[in-house]
Amino acid sequence: MTLEIQNASARAGGREIVHNLDLALAPGEIVAVVGPNGAGKSTLLKLACGLMPLHGGEIRFDGSKIGSLSAGELSRRRALLPQECPMRARFTSLELVLMGTAISGQGRPMAERVAIAQDTLNRVGLSSFMERDIMTLSGGGKAARSSRPSAGTA
């Protein structure tokens, strides 16, 4: 999948958060988005996933404008797991990744979907967390922002 962001701008709370951003990502590329709190990192991810409207510019997945893709098509092309999530259900990491195959692996046998989910966790170096409850995984700086101790580390 290619992702192209051209001249993207976004507004929130009456101010511009992202201004004329250009970014092009090729299949298999790994990118880190780094910056201080409030720099627009989360906004960039929301824009790139189609979860926030653009104030200006354009975003394309594999050459298709993000606004022209249906919710189902977007689900097959991208996935997002936010650091902070209102979900309080108990799932293992493998079960959570397996949920992503419900759409992308539609029509495939369950054993094949499980293999895809396991391979995905292996590729990102999380194979040792497959059976771990997602609520025990760290959220990066979560412990630093909270007075309560972290439930665990990942």
Image (cartoon, helix red, strand yellow):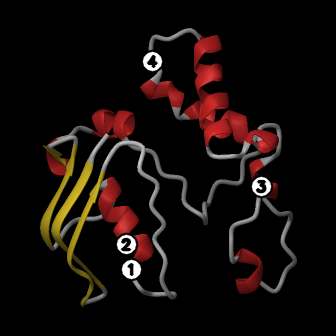
Alpha carbon separation for disc pair 3 and 4: 27 Å
Name the mark on residue 106. 4
Query: What residue sits right under mark 3 in the picture?
Result: 135
Toward the viewer: 130 or 148? 130
Q: Nearer the viewer, mark 4 or mark 1?
A: 1
Q: Which residue is mark 1?
A: 40
Real-space Cα separation, disc 4 to disc 1, in angstroms? 34 Å
Which is more N-terminal, label 1 or label 3? 1
User: Cβ–Cβ below 8 Å for labels 2 and 1?
Assistant: yes
Q: Secondary structure at mark 4?
A: loop
Closer to viewer: mark 3 or mark 1: 1
* Type of the residue with mark 4: Gln
Q: Which label sits on residue 43?
A: 2
| Amino acid type of the residue that numbered disc 3 sits on in the rendered structure | Met
Q: Earlier in the sequence, mark 2 or mark 3?
A: 2
Q: Assess disc 2: are there few (<14), some (14-19) or many (≥20) residues with their C-alpha within 10 Å of its C-alpha.
A: some
| 107, above or below 25, in the image | above
Q: Earlier in the sequence, mark 3 or mark 4?
A: 4
